[in-house]
Image: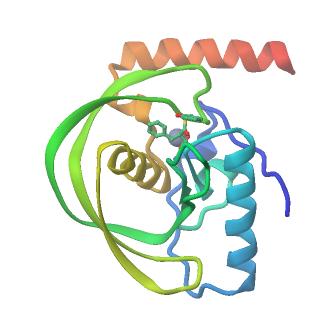
């Protein structure tokens, strides 16, 4: 297994649209294992392949406190959504920034799992938020895009300064 490098905002590669996975083969399963290893190590509750510069429609999630309920969604599609909720979000690609974002309260998602089997699940609360956040990554969208352009520019400057200092 391997730890993958996470891209940071405003890296333009985070804006790439991920392509659907054609076949869940050994190479995809190995990538899924690396995504989980990276997400658990950082740590995060979710990670999209886009964030590690791999532009395939794959996300991994584990919102459990025990970190023992891995969920892999390949080619995820939101079939239904209802209600709204406003929750504080963070992002591994936008470190140390937390903002309240409005999203659907309850969603139904169809996807393939890491074995290539089709699954449908209904999620609410933090799982619903996390799935929507990760699906946005696959579309090249970040949670800061829901903020005002002034706030987004300030965050961009702050992170660029940090990246320059670290380099
Ligand atoms: O996609 C990502 O960048 C991962 C992100 C997912 C997410 C968190 C909160 C709301 C929406 C989406 C994170 O995991 S940020 C880190 C985080 O929230 C966390 C990390 C460890 C334990 C608990 C939470
Ligand atoms: Zn994120």
* Residue displayed at 64% across by 18% down: 159
**Where is residue 90 drawn, in percent x and y?**
50, 30
* Residue displayed at 61% across by 62% down: 55
Can residue 58 be seen in this snapshot? no
The one of 88 and 49 positioned closer to us in this rendering: 88
Can residue 12 be seen in this snapshot? yes
* Residue displayed at 25% across by 40% down: 103
Coloration mode: rainbow
**Where is residue 87 drawn, in percent x and y?**
32, 30
Q: Say which quadrant the C terminus sits in.
A: top right
**Where is residue 152 drawn, in percent x and y?**
44, 20
The correct choice, above or below, for 41 with respect to 161 in the image is below
Taking the image as shown, residue 163 lies to the left or right of residue 81, namely right
The correct choice, above or below, for 159 with respect to 30 in the image is above
Residue most extreme to the front: 66
Q: Say which quadrant the N terminus sits in.
A: bottom right
Taking the image as shown, residue 9 lies to the left or right of residue 149, namely right
The correct choice, above or below, for 151 with respect to 55 in the image is above
Residue most extreme to the left: 83
* Residue displayed at 68% across by 58% down: 36
Q: How many marks?
A: 0
Taking the image as shown, residue 15 lies to the left or right of residue 28, namely left
**Where is residue 18 drawn, in percent x and y?**
53, 63
């Amino acid at each position: 297994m391997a730890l993958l490098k996470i891209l940071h905002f405003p890296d333009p590669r985070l804006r790439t649209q991920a392509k659907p996975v054609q076949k869940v083969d050994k190479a995809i399963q190995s990538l899924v294992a690396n995504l989980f290893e990276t997400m658990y190590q950082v740590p995060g509750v979710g990670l999209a392949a886009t964030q590690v510069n791999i532009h395939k429609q794959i996300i991994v999630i584990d919102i459990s406190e025990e970190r023992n309920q891995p969920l892999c969604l390949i080619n995820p599609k939101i079939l239904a959504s209802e209600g709204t909720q406003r929750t504080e979000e963070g992002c591994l690609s936008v470190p140390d920034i937390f903002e309240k974002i409005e999203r659907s309260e309850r969603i139904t998602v169809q996807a393939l799992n890491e074995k290539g089997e089709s699954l449908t699940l209904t999620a609410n609360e933090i799982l619903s938020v996390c799935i929507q956040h990760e699906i946005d990554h696959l579309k090249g969208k970040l949670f800061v895009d829901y903020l005002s352009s002034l706030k987004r520019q300030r965050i961009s400057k702050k992170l660029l300064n940090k990246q320059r200092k670290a380099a």
